[in-house]
């Protein structure tokens, strides 16, 4: 009798679980594509490109200066005393190292600037996705741009049009 009650309770939970599982709704969106279509992203790209151009121009000036120093050194190398020659070689090597350091710092600076510019955009998109998920009663919304989702059914709701509407993008 006791085992019959246990079986009935287990069967009831299994039945309820199956009924609830049928109500689950999933959605998907391509966040990379969505972000790329936003006007804010285009503005961020332009600002980032402007910053990259400034840094590249400065690196070019440094490169030209180094080349001039090297050419001057090479034209005088045979006539210079050993101490002066060693000093000039050291100066050229030091300048090459400064250029490499500048290049690395410029790349880091651009990465930080990109993150700074994209963070508000990503937060805006995430907020719109959250709102769509709540409004549509979705359990999960998967980002299909990461290629992590290995399968999605036609029953999965494409949330991109709804999120675009939230963001005011056509």
Image (tube, helix red, strand yellow):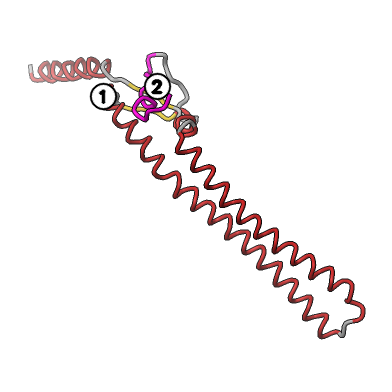
The reply, left or right, for residue 136 in relation to residue 57 is left
The disc label shown at residue 92, or none: none
Where disc 1 sits, the SS reads helix
Which residue, as the protein is rendered here, is positioned at the far left?
1
Q: Give the magenta range.
A: 155-170
The disc label shown at residue 135, or none: 1
The quarter of the picture where the N terminus appears is top left
Q: Which residue is mark 2?
A: 161
Which residue is nearer to you in this view: 125 or 165? 165
How many neighbours does mark 2 have within 10 angstroms: few (below 14), some (14-19), or many (20 or more)? few
Residue drawn at x 49%, y 53% as measured from the top left: 112
Report x, y in % for residue 2: 8, 20
Magenta run includes residue 97: no
Q: Is residue 109 above or below residue 12?
A: below
Where disc 2 sits, the SS reads helix
Residue drawn at x 49%, y 33% as measured from the top left: 36
Q: What is the distance, in whole Å, between disc 2 and disc 1 at their CAs?
A: 14 Å
Magenta run includes residue 166: yes
Q: Is residue 112 above or below residue 45?
A: below
Q: Is residue 84 above or below residue 113?
A: below
| Residue depth check, mark 2 versus mark 1: number of the one nearer the observer | 2
State the image quarter where residue 142 is shown. Answer: top left
Which numbered disc, 2 or 1, marks the residue that appears first in the sequence?
1
Which residue is nearer to you in this view: 22 or 91? 91
Report x, y in % for residue 38: 45, 33
The quarter of the picture where the C terminus appears is top left
Residue drawn at x 84%, y 68% as measured from the top left: 71
The reply, left or right, for residue 17 in relation to residue 162 is left
């Amino acid at each position: 009798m006791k085992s019959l009650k246990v079986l009935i309770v287990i069967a009831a939970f299994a039945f309820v679980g199956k009924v609830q599982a049928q109500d689950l709704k999933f959605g998907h969106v391509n966040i990379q594509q969505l972000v790329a279509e936003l006007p804010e992203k285009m503005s961020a790209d332009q600002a980032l490109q402007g910053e990259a151009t400034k840094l590249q121009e400065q690196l070019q000036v440094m490169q030209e200066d180094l080349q001039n120093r090297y050419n001057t050194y090479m034209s005088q190398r045979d006539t210079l005393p050993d101490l002066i020659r060693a000093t000039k070689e050291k100066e050229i090597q030091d300048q090459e190292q400064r250029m490499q350091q500048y290049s690395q710092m410029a790349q880091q600076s651009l990465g930080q600037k990109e993150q700074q510019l994209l963070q508000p955009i990503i937060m805006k998109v995430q907020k719109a996705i959250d709102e769509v998920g709540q409004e549509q009663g979705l359990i999960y919304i998967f980002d299909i741009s990461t290629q992590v989702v290995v399968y999605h059914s036609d029953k999965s709701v494409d949330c991109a049009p709804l999120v675009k509407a939230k963001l005011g993008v056509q």
